[in-house]
Amino acid sequence: MEQLETKLKVSNISKTFFNKKDYFTAIEDVSFDVKDGEFLVILGPGRCGKTVLLNIIAGLVEKTSGSVIYDGKEINGVDPEMGMVFQKTALMPFKTVMENVELGLKFSGMDKKKRREICQKYIDLVGLQGFENSYPNALSGGMKQRVGIARAYANNPKLLIMDEPFGALDAQTRYSMQNEVLRIWEQEKRTVIYVTNNIEEAIYLGTRIVLLSKCPASVKAEYTIDLPRPRDMVSDEFMNLRTKISENTDLSV
Ligand SMILES: Nc1ncnc2c1ncn2[C@@H]1O[C@H](COP(=O)(O)OP(=O)(O)OP(=O)(O)O)[C@@H](O)[C@H]1O
Ligand SMILES: [Mg+2]
């Protein structure tokens, strides 16, 4: 197999939250690499520390110890090359779908014609054509999530970080969105870090899975998934892998 370059190196990350009387450790000594062009899935039970970990990688939350190296440089703060799709998309309520998607590009000074062209492409890609002029309160939860995805893609991030982006969607929409994300990843060769608590989703999407323990999150195992795509969720190989990973998974607490 060709040797891929390391895009991101997460080393010995720990995070303890302190308040006046107490402290709480959410992440304990987590290390893993993400290779350029990889679709890395972080799989972990509910409330194990997945969002905190992603926020540390994205420079949104301070770590207690450890380091995050992106393209050879230590991250301190938000890096414009990273794009994040949050677990719950926050949209600007008084801006339309198009205006929400184009915010980052507008901020960067791109002219209107160019940014509208780019944003339209991603609005179409996530299946929101016809809703460009709608306001968020007229959209379903799944549609809002799609706006968040279009917005993240439109900024052309080199590293796309997705935090359980489809957790709130119905099964059918979720499946079609997973395939969209794979299609864009295959077409545009971006590096993706994708968080989920769902084993099937992890095996369906990932080139590799980093399995986290229950809170405080530590790395329990890593699995390289080299099943051919599109992956058949009821094939023997898929089911065997599912059994193997679930035997090693902590129950949600
Ligand atoms: N700012 C904070 N102060 C104190 N504790 C926090 C803070 N942020 C998160 N935590 C705690 O850290 C733990 C992990 O939270 P986190 O949101 O990362 O979990 P998660 O794995 O993303 O959960 P879910 O699957 O529900 O999204 C939780 O117990 C949470 O209460
Ligand atoms: Mg979370």
Image (cartoon, helix red, strand yellow):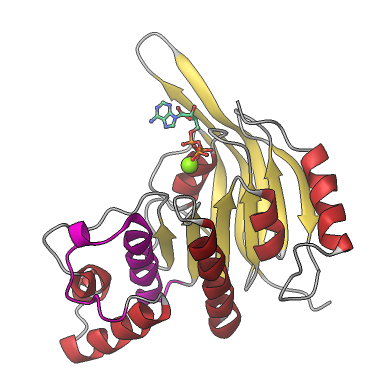
Specify whether 234 is left or right of 8. right
Residues 186 and 83: in front is 186
Quadrant where the N terminus is found in the figure: bottom right
197 over 14 or under it: above or below: below
Residues 228 and 169: in front is 169
Residue at the image point whose x is 77% and y is 50% from the top: 222
Residue 28: x percent and y percent? 62, 31
Specify whether 34 is left or right of 113. right
The answer, for residue 238, to whether it is visible in the render is: yes
Image quadrant assignment for residue 215: top right
Residue occupying the far top of the picture:
21
Image quadrant assignment for residue 179: bottom right
Which residues are drawn in magenta?
A: 129-157
Residue 211 magenta: no
Residue 208: x percent and y percent? 72, 60
Residue 22: x percent and y percent? 43, 11
Image quadrant assignment for residue 25: top right
Specify whether 189 is left or right of 95. right
Specify whether 135 is left or right of 143. left
Residues 47 and 133: in front is 133
26 over 30 or under it: above or below: above
